[in-house]
Amino acid sequence: MKESEGCVLCTKEPATTKEHIPSRGVFLVKPKQYLTVPACERCNNSAKLDDQYFRDVLAACSTTEEGRAVWRNKVMARFKERPATKIGFRDQMAPVNVTSEVGGSMVLPGIRVNAERFERCIRKMVWGLYWWHSSRLLDPTTPLDVHFLNFVQAPAFFRDQKQVSIFRKAAPGVYRAPGEVPTFCYLFGITAEVSIWYFIFYRQNMAIGFTDSARRSADV
Ligand SMILES: [Zn+2]
């Protein structure tokens, strides 16, 4: 493990624990080399419930074999002992209007997602990986944009040539083993001012994170 004396997530407190990236619940089979970053107790503990929620929703939104397996073995398995989770999911179900090239316009069952909780999880991954790949701490006040794409929205997003050319320059992250990639992988790019992160869960759901340090100084 790389060393940092301070928590790389808040960059304030001393690091006393290790935070797994992505959170442990995402994988059914633990990766051989699980990436961890130094974190303080507070950052580590505060992320736990959000991480579980994040994983539950991603699995619920997946139709791939990997996503369904996580849904069955990790999410549904908890319904018995924690009926509130099931009720919580039911209450968040809502019809969504989806327009896609394949299906045209249709109404699908969807889940209302708590964007704040999702963004907190992405923030943690971005801050941790930024340090991991650049050996620099990312200032916690740096603005982060988060964009979610599911498999229905992805083709439209990648029709934008600008997005495609940025994506093509991205380098693969540390999870590259054939057993890991279908569950989770990421690509990234870091320059002096900006960083971009493509997180792909269960071959289907993509979260894009973008940080821009210049925007912060411009804002001040
Ligand atoms: Zn911290």
Image (cartoon, rainbow, N blue to C red):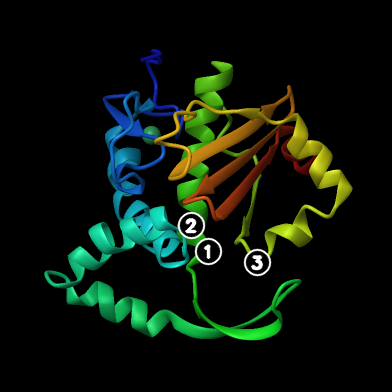
* Amino acid marked by disc 3: Val
Q: Nearer the viewer, mark 2 or mark 3?
A: 3
Furthest residue toward right: 161
Q: Quadrant of residue 138?
A: top right
Which residue is at the front of the view, 8 or 14? Answer: 8
Q: Residues within 10 Å of mark 2 (few under 14, many from 20)?
A: many
Which residue carries the number 1 mark? 115
Describe the element under mark 1 as helix, strand or loop: helix
The residue sitting at 42% across, 36% down in the picture is 180
Which residue carries the number 2 mark? 118
* Amino acid marked by disc 1: Ala
For the residues bearing labels 1 and 3, Cβ distance under 8 angstroms: no
Cα distance between the residues tagged 2 and 3: 19 Å
Which residue is at the front of the view, 78 or 12? Answer: 78
Residue 6 position (above or below residue 51): above
* Amino acid marked by disc 2: Phe
Q: Residues within 10 Å of mark 3 (few under 14, many from 20)?
A: some
Cα distance between the residues tagged 2 and 1: 5 Å
Measured as percent of width and height from the top left, residue 145 is found at 66, 50
Residue 216 position (above or below residue 95): above
Q: Quadrant of residue 157?
A: bottom right
Which residue carries the number 3 mark? 152
